[in-house]
Image: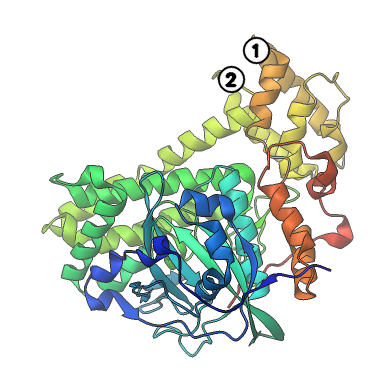
Amino acid sequence: MTSPATAEQPGAIHSRLSALSNSYAQLPERFFARTDPKPVSEPRLIRLNRALADELGLDADQLTGPDGVQMLAGNRFPEGSQAIALAYAGHQFGNFVPQLGDGRALLLGEVVDINGIRRDIQLKGSGPTRFSRNGDGRAALGPVLREYVVSEAMAALGIPTTRSLAAVLTGDPVYREVRLPGAVLTRVAASHIRIGTFQYFAARHDTEGLKILADYAIERHFPHLLGQARRYRALLDAVVTAQADLVARWMLVGFIHGVMNTDNMAISGETIDYGPCAFMDAYDPGTVFSSIDRVGRYAYANQPRIATWNLARLAETLLPLMSTDENEAVSEAEEVLGSFQSSYETVLQRGFRRKLGLLTEAEGDLQLAADFLDVLARGEADFTLGFRRLGDDLDASEGHGTARQLFRDPGAFDAWSVRWRERIASETAETDTRRAAMHAVNPKFIPRNHRMEAMIQAALGGDFTPFEEILTVVSRPFDEQEVMERYADPPRPDERVKQTFCGT
């Protein structure tokens, strides 16, 4: 049985954190609510992401000490910080809610990391705010651990994402359907500006607020657009391109966000808000895990369409800034939105070629990829291992190899494999070179749903060993890790997780 380290008496807070800035807090007061975290009784550190702390220029030893743990729990502020809860609106499952906002999160401030990039530092689960809507503002341990693991897995997979700096037990219970341990996650993001942030001001016909927000977003995320005559159209174009790239990357690893509401879509192009998210096991384009998505709105295959829908909502908010002529603004917005599909397909097609080990482009490649997905679906085969084992089997003779063992009926795979082998034989790359290229894009390890649920149950009982193990494994998703081989295995029928749950 393992347990987190206990924080002791608070002292001086690390000077780097004492120098937090908060450019968002310099915007007009209607953009946020100033709120102090609600103290917790007995904060204990579960884990600090030391590599991320180094990237942010923070002293990991200070953060794991008594003072740092008190700050990561929300009991103390870095000197001079301006904690704020951000205001935003959003479409939730297609229904517009004009005021949402950070109901259980506080932006402590920003640091400029060692690469010169400005990053938000936010506490999630730090207590109620003006936007809590009668909620307790707290987070349960399970969702905190899920977000920590999945966000770090996504980062290791090379997918733009918010990051997890720390997880802390509060010592206080939270009440959902049952009594659960409370926890606080320290989240790091390029920013927390969402499509719903723009909707908040549009819903209030606050064109001045929209302009302030758009200018701030451009300066922070797309400074190359400053000074452009059509910068608000250019802003929309930049966000569309970023989201097309992001969603294509999700699709290439079988990730399902689960709750693609407009308030859960960051304009930075990072994956944000890991609630009922999951990775597919057996490939099925209609896969839904979220317990609250009863009609499959956010199913795996629907994610590109929903992203386009969400971006259309962003475009609607920007129309008054794009042109005083409404027809002209609408025409420009439609043109920009029309670019999503081509941008998305470019990333997706390039990605699937690489996953199949195709180092050149040829007619028929995309059909070959589509047919493999169809074979995976009909064979009820695992998405992740289906691609991974193609690389393993490059030396195997036809009708043999480990990939075909994944299929309920391998006949269709065998027929497809003949075509695939003929295609790769048309290229001159060495087998070892091709295998290395395939293994560099086809992960062996993902946060398997059944492993995640077992990890959470163990942590609820005080054992954080599975949390540490799965975190270690998914932080090196492309590497062979023989001692952790079991984490690559798909679930047995009795282990399958069919539903995931939001943390609220």
Q: Residue at x 50, y 77 (%)?
A: 74
Which type of secondary structure does the marked residue at label 2 adopt?
Answer: loop
* 249 or 469: nearer the viewer: 469
Label number found at residue 359: 2
**Residue 396, horizontal then vertical, whole percent:** 84, 20
Q: Residue at x 62, y 75 (%)?
A: 7
Q: Residue at x 76, y 54 (%)?
A: 469
Looking at the image, is mark 2 or mark 1 earlier in the sequence? Answer: 2
Farthest top residue in view: 428
In the image, what residue type sits under mark 2? Leu
Image quadrant where residue 249 sits: top right
Q: Is residue 457 above or below residue 370?
A: below
Farthest bottom residue in view: 134
- The answer to whether residue 297 shows anywhere in this view is no
Query: What's the coloring here?
Result: rainbow
**Residue 258, horizontal then vertical, whole percent:** 59, 62
> Looking at the image, do the residues carrying marks 2 and 1 touch, with CB atoms under 8 Å apart?
yes
**Residue 405, horizontal then vertical, whole percent:** 87, 36
Tell me how many marks there are. 2
**Residue 208, horizontal then vertical, whole percent:** 16, 69
- Image position of 478 (left or right of 124): right
Quadrant location of the N terminus in the rendered image: bottom right
Which type of secondary structure does the marked residue at label 1 adopt?
Answer: loop
Q: Which residue is mark 1?
A: 429
Quadrant location of the C terminus in the rendered image: bottom right
Q: What is the C-alpha distance between the residues marked 2 and 1?
A: 8 Å
